Amino acid sequence: MRMGRELDRMKKECNMHTNRIKGLLVLHGIRIKGALRGLRKQLDSIRLWDGSELSPNVKADLGRELERLELLLRQRKELKAERKRRLAASASDAVRGHTRRVLHRGAAGRAIARAPIRSAEAAARDDEERAAAH
């Protein structure tokens, strides 16, 4: 499932950019609790501990990181919508239900969902080996 892997990767990248933004702010003595929503609008009003403005270089760094984060968030939203559209277009109700359960579980669920297939394959190999031994 290619889309699931891409969504997982995008989530990790979003976390990286969020951590980078928060790290830049903490480096200059500014703490943001919770989400970074609305930070772009606040960039000009953010002040350092002594009341001075952020340097233009820091504002530019934060602006670029925010752009990257916003792009990733937009792409994730589009990819999720595409995945949902493909799922709705699926012909089989059984496949749709199984896929929905696997998607709901996330990456660990996908591994668990594949486990019965692997164990069935292993059992078939064991049966073949036993038959060949006799």
Image (tube, rainbow, N blue to C red):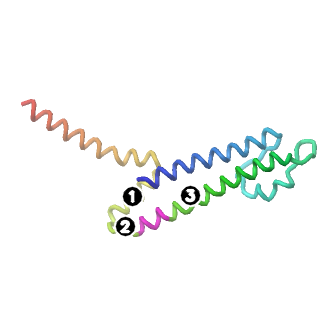
At label 2, the amino acid type is Ser
Contact (CB < 8 A) between labels 2 and 1?
A: yes
At label 3, the amino acid type is Arg
When the figure is inspected, residue 18 is found, relative to residue 131, above or below; the finding is below
Q: How many labels does the image show?
A: 3
Q: Which of marks 2 and 1 is in front?
A: 2
The range drawn in magenta is 82-88
The residue that disc 3 covers is: 76
At label 1, the amino acid type is Thr
Magenta-drawn stretch contains 37: no
The residue that disc 2 covers is: 90
**Residue name at image x 85 percent, y 51 percent:** 46
**Residue name at image x 42 percent, y 48 percent:** 109
Label 3, secondary structure: give it: helix
The residue that disc 1 covers is: 99
Question: Where's the C terminus, which quadrant?
Answer: top left
